[in-house]
Amino acid sequence: MNNIEKILADIDSQSLSSIFEIQSGHDLDHVAFKEEIKKRSSYFYDQLKFQSGHAVILKHSNSIQFFIDFLALYFIEVTAIPIDPLTSDKELGNLLSFSKAIALVDENGVKPLAGFPSEELEGIALVLFTSGTISSPKGVKISKKALLKKFDVLEQNIGASTIERSLCFVSTFFGHGLICNSLFPIFKGKKLFIAPKMTMAMARDFSNILENHKITFFSSVPSHWEILLEFGELPLNHSLKRVNCASSPLTHAKIKRVLEWLRHEIPFYDVYGATEMLGWFADNAIQQVDSKLAFTNFWNLEYKINENNELLLKSDYMFNGYWSNDTLTKVDFFNTGDLFIDQKIAGRTKNTINKAGIKIQIEDVVFDFMQSGLLKDAGAFPIEDDFTGQQIGLFVVLNEGHNLKEIKDYCAQHISLIRHPYEVIEVKKIPHNTRGKASSNTLVNVYQELKNIDEGVLKVFNQIFKSSFDTVNIERKSVVNWDSMKHAELIINLQKTFKIKFSAKDIGNTQCLSEVSLQVKNLLISQKDIY
């Protein structure tokens, strides 16, 4: 028996699941699924000559073809690197240069590349790049042995019957969606229903999806619930046995609404995970609104707290170190970067922004924009957001002769969508600490000061116009008594409140209260050292 025959025999011996694609209705039972994986394995191994130590980049959306490609690489022992299909060309170029990949596989097929094998990747089934680090790649190496151990740990703590018919609409280019929500049921012989990311249309059809396919389990992140709670419904005749929510803690207000949505009938769990620990490693049952949001059930691992209250972890299913990074080699315990106090996650020690469950390095955001040549300096910071958890804020000091529109154009052309800033604000200088780094906390405080200006402007407006608007997005033409005299009264009162002086040009050009507020901010910025 030659090598490919052994590989095909190995695939046949596996208890792989059946798989169904929600968007297209494409359905493969376990026999047909295995046949597709075997065909793809033979193609990769015999025709393309992929071998152990090679890396292949998978630039797929959630689809059956993604799993066929991934599993074919897994069985011929080639390292798969799943990435966001919206990765920009510039970021992809960085990744290709770093990885020396032998091929890029996407929806259009296989694109051979001039890569070569690496001894470092032998025995490594998967490399996941931690969120927001493609510009300066930080790849987490995951072995086949660690994956198989992780599936057993997940089975012990979640149960195989729970995932009998699992729905995944979480992105499969990071551990939550790929390892825990998808590969776990696949390797335990349970049916996987794969769907694109959550949208309003999907939320409206969610009740039908759950009922028609008798879904027993799905996982989520907090931003999914913003859509589901608004547009989705739970079917009356549901088969759900468990629902997970991972990536960031839920607020009590959100928990209340989720439990009501689930009609207090379905076990609901807050789940804690990290790419380096192959996804989820602890959970907490949420049974009532005032449930203690603490993680006391850690799955088959050791944990301890260092002198800074940072959580450290060790297990036999953890990662195999960082790829080609001597300064980030694997240690005995993994430093999570999370503060852990009274069994609860109490914040981050690392400079990250948690956007829709994806942790983005602040330094990488700044690096990306400084590459544009448009800026003297930049500072990124988190903006709290009910929908995504956090958004990216960016303060910039522009080079002479450039403007914010150029920044937006650069962003559209070179920055992946997940890392697009929610707001870009021009300032005179960025505050730095003694190590020369921008202070994220200071930037958050400055941002809040600027947001408070909107509230102050709105308060003055409502007092003058005897109104109760809750936003500065008020069109002048839509307010009947907003004539020149009332506008003059507004300007005079704003000047007194904020101790500023409007120019005649500013007074005449405003057509919306948000423009007035922006003018107030600009006038205040001109008076301050930082902004």
Image (spheres, rainbow, N blue to C red):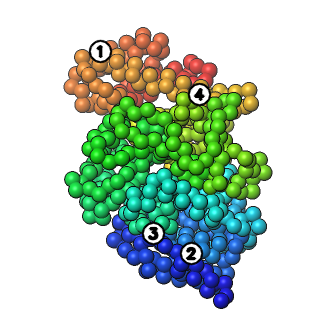
Mark 3 highlights which residue? Answer: 189
Pointer 3 or 1: first along the chain:
3
Percent x, y for residue 344?
52, 33
Q: Residue at x 65, y 34 (%)?
A: 305
Pointer 2 or 3: first along the chain:
2
Q: How many residues crowd mark 2 within 10 Å: few (<14), some (14–19), many (20+)?
A: many
Seen in the picture, residue 197 relative to 14 is either above or below; the reply is above
C-alpha distance separating marks 1 and 4: 33 Å
Q: Nearer the viewer, mark 2 or mark 3?
A: 3
Q: Residue at x 26, y 50 (%)?
A: 233
Pointer 2 or 1: first along the chain:
2
C-alpha distance separating marks 2 and 1: 67 Å
For residue 413, which numbered disc appears in the image?
none
Mark 2 highlights which residue? Answer: 72
Seen in the picture, residue 439 relative to 334 is either above or below; the reply is above
Residue type at mark 2: give it. Answer: Ala
Q: How many residues crowd mark 3 within 10 Å: few (<14), some (14–19), many (20+)?
A: some
Mark 4 highlights which residue? Answer: 441
Mark 1 highlights which residue? Answer: 463
Q: Nearer the viewer, mark 4 or mark 3?
A: 3
Pointer 2 or 4: first along the chain:
2
- Asked which secondary structure carries label 2, the reply is helix
Residue type at mark 4: give it. Answer: Asn
Percent x, y for residue 200?
32, 52
Residue type at mark 3: give it. Answer: Gly
Q: Nearer the viewer, mark 1 or mark 4?
A: 4
Q: How many residues crowd mark 4 within 10 Å: few (<14), some (14–19), many (20+)?
A: few
Pointer 4 or 3: first along the chain:
3
Pointer 1 or 4: first along the chain:
4
Residue type at mark 1: give it. Answer: Gln
